[in-house]
Image: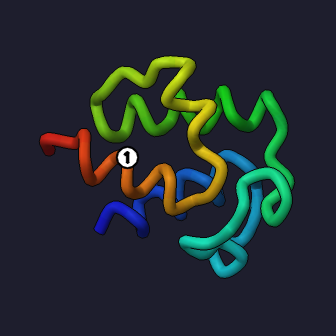
């Protein structure tokens, strides 16, 4: 499931527990992401899902669900 993969990527990248991450978690407000985290997350997502994210795509990711829905719509794996 894509959510589980995304949750694992976020937990590893940001050094937080997977238990803290839900579909409704705000990357900034709930999980404390900063610009460096955003870059690292986007690189990990690109590598894991074998796709290229544009800066515009990354800027749309406000909640965990935004990432999951984007990947569901754009992932061909």
Query: In the visual, does 13 lie left or right of 57?
Result: right
Question: Which residue occupies 50% across, 62% down?
Answer: 65
Please give the residue where the numbered disc 1 appears in the rendered image: 70
Q: Is residue 74 above or below residue 27?
A: above
Front residue of 55/9: it is 55
Front residue of 75/16: it is 75
Q: Is residue 38 above or below residue 67?
A: above
Question: Which residue occupies 84% across, 38% down?
Answer: 34
Query: In the visual, does 71 lie left or right of 15?
Result: left
Instruction: For the N terminus, give its image quadrant.
Output: bottom left
Quarter assignment of residue 45: top left
Quarter assignment of residue 49: top left
Question: Which residue occupies 68% across, 68% down?
Answer: 25
Q: Give how far across and how far down residue 5 sits, in percent.
A: 41, 59
- Within-10-Å neighbours for mark 1: few <14, some 14–19, many 20+: few
Question: Which residue occupies 54% across, 22% down?
Answer: 56
């Amino acid at each position: 499931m894509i959510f589980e993969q995304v949750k694992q990527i976020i937990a590893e990248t940001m050094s937080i527990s997977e238990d803290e991450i839900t579909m409704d978690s705000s990357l900034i407000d709930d999980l404390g992401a900063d610009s460096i985290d955003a870059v690292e997350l986007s690189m990990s997502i690109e590598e894991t899902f074998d796709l290229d994210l544009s800066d515009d795509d990354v800027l749309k990711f406000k909640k965990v669900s935004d990432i999951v829905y984007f990947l569901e719509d754009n992932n061909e794996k």
